[in-house]
Image (cartoon, rainbow, N blue to C red):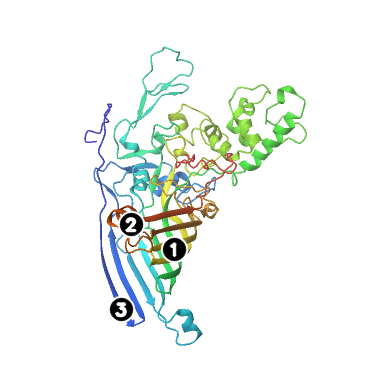
Amino acid sequence: PSSNQYIHSLGAYNLDELTKAWGVFAQDSYRIRPTLTLNYGLRWDFTWADRDLTNLYHSATPTNIFGPSGVGNLFNPGSLNGTMNPQLVQNSQPYNNWFVAPQPAFGIAWNPRGGDGALGRLLGGDKTVIRAGFSFRTFTEPQQYVWNEASDYGSFYYQGFFLNAVKGANQAGAFQPGSLFLGSPLPAYGFKPQSFQKVESESDFTFLGGNVPGVNGIDPNLKQPYTESWNLGIQRQLGENRALEVRYIGNRTLRQWVAIDTNEVNIFENGFLAQFKAAQNNLNINNASGNASFQGSFANHGLPGQQPLPIFNAAFAGEPAGADGSAADFTNGGFTGFVSTGQAGLFASTLAGAPYICNMVGSAALTPCQTNLGITTAGAGYPINFFQANPYAQGAGFATTELVAEGYSNYNGLQVDFRQRQWHGLQFDANYTWSHTLGISSPNNWQGQSNIFTLRNMRLSYGPTLFDIRHAININGSYDLPFGRGKQFLNDSNAVLDRVVGGWTIGTILGYQAGAPFLLEGGNNTFNANLNNDGYGDGG
């Protein structure tokens, strides 16, 4: 980095990050009366944002994540309120520190007596305790979340390699289609960026594939997640050695970090879904026409009931004709598969890439079409954000994501616990828990992935979490066998026999729990192309 050059040899680079925190807390206990005790406290944390001390992390601000559309301007084709030159910028601290974090907690323990009547007999005199509590606690998500987004998956630690077939190619990293043969020496390949830069335009990487940076970043006003917890329980002593306790425990967590795909493909507002349905209709009519050349084509051949497909015509412009006389992609096996299986989202995501989006919008409107791929076309006048908010993030590394604090979850559980203290050699504990965990959140792993189906309604992703265990039973106990001196049997045994049969204890531990939920999906991306749950999505 000091020489602004990359090392083209094997090796490793040590990261140098710093995060720090300190806190103060106070707690006290006050016995209001002999049967009622109050516990209370306050904690205050001061947490600094994770910082890259080497000043090498690159990421995108919200303005550069949303690109031409403008921050938060999703699914609005033709509305271009943002920057036409989105950039990746060196930023060693992409979000703010958290210094205002008061966290109260309190609890009570009450030993009701109930008097001499029926209530007193039910409570067992002084043998019942009621406990309740509430706490508010902030926490910090795993550092993997920060690395993913703050460093753009470490993109600028590496130099992207590319070698693409480009018509009219005359630059490193490109060659004339058909000019290479098996055994030919490789032409000069390209690197992006050429040298380490503090600021790099996203358009330098558009359409160049997975070996160049994606567009990822963090909301600079990212909030610290917190959990509110509460509990209520009643414990009743039964006899001298047994107790039964029933507890309700609940919590809710807000501001959980999730990486949202801001380049979710659009099939509604731009009219694509309507034309996709028309393509399905055209395919069915062509297949039933009896004309062999029309079989497997979703083009409009003017047959009764067929409809025009201007979006597809624009996307396929300039192609050679296929067997049916229309552009070859109307009979492309992959595309007809999309149409026949209803994969509108995946089809739209494909057309959002080159060369299709270039044919639709024109190389003058979306300059990487020409500068990176050598495609020169007037286009059909469609807006550059026809499918996605930021077309400059298309086909460049990982998906386009922004780390935001919009996840949430909750837990509710009922616990029943029966305890038996030592009694004639027997002691055990048996407990049962019914619980339910729901949320919109990242899975419980270190990777910082998110399972958000669509930004149109994040509530659609609300459901059982991957660690939602509905039922759990645990039993453990031990029994001292009644043999040997001081026991019920063989009490008068001699020393040798006592060593053989005396002092034995048997024990058991039993556990049962219901299985964890799993996501069941059909595999057809009918709505959008971000349902593969690989942690990166397919948005850009």
Residue sitting farthest toward the left = 2
What residue does disc 3 label? 30
Q: Is residue 381 visible?
A: no
Q: Is residue 45 visible?
A: yes
Q: Which mark is residue 43?
A: none
Label 3 sits on what residue type? Answer: Tyr
Q: Is residue 396 left or right of residue 28?
A: right
Name the residue at 76% across, 31% down: 303
Task: Please state the horizontal and vertical placement of residue 323, each as a whole percent of the image.
Answer: 67, 21
Compared with 467, 229 (above or below) is below
Q: Give the quarter of the figure containing the N terminus.
A: top left
Badge 2 vs badge 3, beta-carbon distance below 8 Å: no
Foreground residue among 256 and 192: 256
Upstream in sequence: badge 2 or badge 3: 3
Foreground residue among 139 and 248: 248
Foreground residue among 472 and 161: 472
What residue does disc 1 label? 251
Q: Which-is-in-front pick, marks 1 and 3? A: 3
Q: Which mark is residue 502?
A: 2
Task: Please state the horizontal and vertical placement of residue 382, each as a whole percent of the image.
Answer: 56, 39
Label 2 sits on what residue type? Answer: Gly
Q: Residues within 10 Å of mark 2 (few under 14, many from 20)?
A: many
Find numbered disc 3 in the image and state the secondary structure of the residue it sits on: strand
Task: Please state the horizontal and vertical placement of residue 228, each as a whole percent of the image.
Answer: 41, 64
Find numbered disc 2 in the image and state the secondary structure of the residue it sits on: loop
Upstream in sequence: badge 2 or badge 1: 1
- For the residues labelled 1 and 3, the Cα–Cα distance comes to 25 Å
Label 1 sits on what residue type? Answer: Asn
Q: Is residue 494 left or right of residue 255?
A: left
Name the residue at 31% across, 80% down: 31
Name the residue at 49% across, 39% down: 538
